[in-house]
Image (spheres, coloured by chain):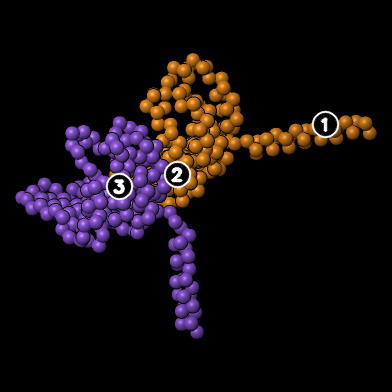
Amino acid sequence: MKRKVLVLVTLAALLAAPTASAGDETRWINVHVTENSSNTNVEVHLPLNLVLTVLKNVDVENFHGGQVDLEIDEDMDINFPEIIAAVKDAPDGEFVTVTSDEADVNVYKQGGTLFVTVNQKDDEMAKVEVTVPLELMDALSFGEENTLDVAALLQSMDELPNGELVKVTSTEANVRVWIE
Amino acid sequence: MNGQRGMSTLGAVLLAGTAGLLTATLMMDWMVVDVHVVEDDTPIHIKVPFPLVVADIAAGFIPDELLEEAEIPPEVTAQKELVLATVEALLDSPDTHLVKVRTEDADVDIFKDGDTLRISVDADDAVVRCNIPIDGVLAALENWDWETVDPQMIFDVLHAAENGELVTVTTDDGVRVAIKMW
């Protein structure tokens, strides 16, 4: 009898779970910073909409209305949309591999996601892992005057599956940014 | 007989007056400053209830020249849209534990709980609890001209605060100060 009740409760819980998660559509940006030397731990858990609203309303020197001025020299003719399109269309594989005494850098694409890893070999021995999902690349929008639409980039995170975006581990501090 | 009727009329007037006064008192927002000092053998407890309507009226008597002298820096005025949009977005956000900071000296937590932002600081030498009415802050900021100091803003926020403790500060040397709304 008890087993029957347990099975029924488990089934009810399983059926209710997707309904509950579908109802809560808020996306969250999480940032965790742990500073090793001072034993400080900071956890920030913000709704994506709140971050977007703030970004769109910031009006400072190089940042207006969610757009950041990349301050690229006008003489440099960089076609960012073309570069991004090329990266998007490229097959999976390693794009950049740099090995030096100071650090190893790898840029590679796997399953439609771009990964950038940096392994520092001295100082803070930092290890950086940046994940750029395809949806983010689609949202990379550049203005005519070398501006990057950060708000559009962030807006696109609304469609991203839950996952890690940035992870930095070093002797000094650990940083983790993820969306859920 | 007439005398008896006169007494009862006076009684009725007094009763009505008392009831009116009581209703007005209950309807008014009150701020209570509650100070406890537990030091050695002489504990002190001071409770000062203060009707906010009095503060509203008193604010009207502050000379304009004094307020004009206290100018708002243009950097603050320039951020009006950002601040209003942020507070509005915060008000619309779901309830959550927004920020958690743990250090060797203090723990800081910020929660969004309904229309209230709850800030708690647990430091080595003091504990602070603060409940900020987000809706009240938004209303006050919307009504503010962002150019001059307006004491009325503070009272607008206080009027919007929920009943209970607005701020409490407890220090390790036995002092507890609480500002309560009633």
Q: Position of residue B4 (x, y in %)?
A: 90, 34
Write down the residue under mark 2.
B90
Label 3 vs label 1: CA separation?
A: 80 Å
Name the residue nearer the viewer: B75 or A58.
A58
Up-down relation of residue A143 to residue A47 (above or below): above
The circle drawn on residue A65 is none
Query: Which residue is depicted at the point 22% across and 52% down?
Result: A86
Q: Residue at x 22, y 53 (%)?
A: A87
Cα distance, mark 3 to mark 2?
Answer: 27 Å
**What residue does disc 1 label?**
B10
Q: Which chain is purple?
A: A
Q: Are marks 3 and 2 on the same chain?
A: no
* Viewer-nearest of discs 1 and 2: 2
Tag 3 residue: A140
Q: Secondary structure at mark 3?
A: loop
Q: Which chain is orange?
A: B
- Name the subunit of mark 2: B
The answer to whether B56 appears left or right of B85 in the picture is: right
> Which quarter of the rendering shows the C terminus of chain A?
bottom left
